[in-house]
Amino acid sequence: MKAQVIALDAPSQSFWWNGGSALRTRIFDALSIVGPSGETFIVNALSEWAKEMADEPGFVSSKLHKEILRLISEEAAHQRAHDVYNKRLNGNTHAKRLEDHMEASMQEMVGLKLSTRLAFVAAFEQLAALHSAEILRPGSVWLSEGNSHQAHLWRWHSREEIAHHKVSIDVLKCYKVGHTKRIAAFVMATIYLHLDLLYFTASFCRADVRAKRINGWQLIFETLTFTVRAIPSMLRMGWGCLNYLVGREQKFG
Ligand SMILES: [Fe+2]
Ligand SMILES: [Fe+2]
């Protein structure tokens, strides 16, 4: 159900760029807040590991090294795109405050051992691949078929994310990161990432209701119907999480 717009200077359909849905638009806006600092964390950990490995015979010419360089350059491009996206978002929301909050949370992880950070990198990439597979699914409950630049950006970002999880798993194998550490990082990353996403989405929506960009009751109705529609997708992602925890190889896309 599309959000009912009640203000006189009501936002246009393109304001709620995700199929006219305020909730789904704000879910992706929240994802964009998480993106840049998460990607900085991934790029820094992988760059540090690649630098450490540079003296190992054959590493620099290996397939894994090429894949890491590609992943790093793709994440850097995502960061630039999301910086622009978030700057626009900051024009009519408190996006900058949420970005600062996210950046501060990620900063707390910078001092962790490299093996722990790499376990988190693999966890974030697995979660990104699971989300991306659902975003790219035909008739996705998350992302509309629309032609907005935001929808194009998310499809491009999701297509590139799909391949990253395999690279991060190969890094874990190469660095011999233990299964317990890998599981612990995944559980923590899943909980913290989704709590942040929930908090950011709720924070955007609350501000929209206060600014009368959307009607509170319509938003509640939209949230309930969306939650029911998203159950199959959430079950598939839950299954993907279980597969990761038992160490089963997964294919996306
Ligand atoms: Fe990315
Ligand atoms: Fe990625």
Image (spheres, rainbow, N blue to C red):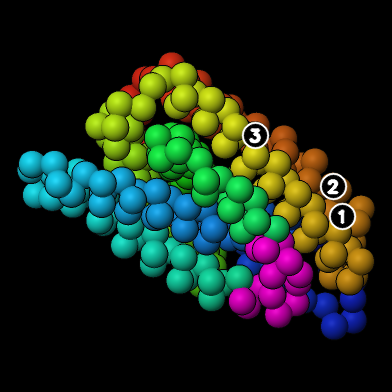
| Lateral position of residue 88 relative to residue 68, left or right | right
Residue position marked by numbered label 1 in the rendering? 218
Label 2: which secondary element: helix
Q: Residues within 10 Å of mark 3 (few under 14, many from 20)?
A: few
Q: Which mark is residue 191?
A: 3
Residue occupying image coordinates x 36% and y 27%: 177
Q: Position of residue 240 (x, y in %)?
A: 47, 27
Label 1: which secondary element: helix
Label 3: which secondary element: helix
Contact check, label 1 and label 2, Cβ < 8 Å: yes
Residue 209 part of the magenta segment: no
| Lateral position of residue 19 relative to residue 54, left or right | right
The part of the chain drawn in magenta is: 87-100
Tell which circle, 3 or 1, labels the residue nearer the N-terminal end. Answer: 3
Residue occupying image coordinates x 33% and y 32%: 172
Residue occupying image coordinates x 45% and y 71%: 80
Residue occupying image coordinates x 90% and y 76%: 7
Amino acid at circle 2: Phe
Amino acid at circle 1: Gln
- Ligand 1 has an atom within 8 Å of the beta carbon of the residue at disc 2: no
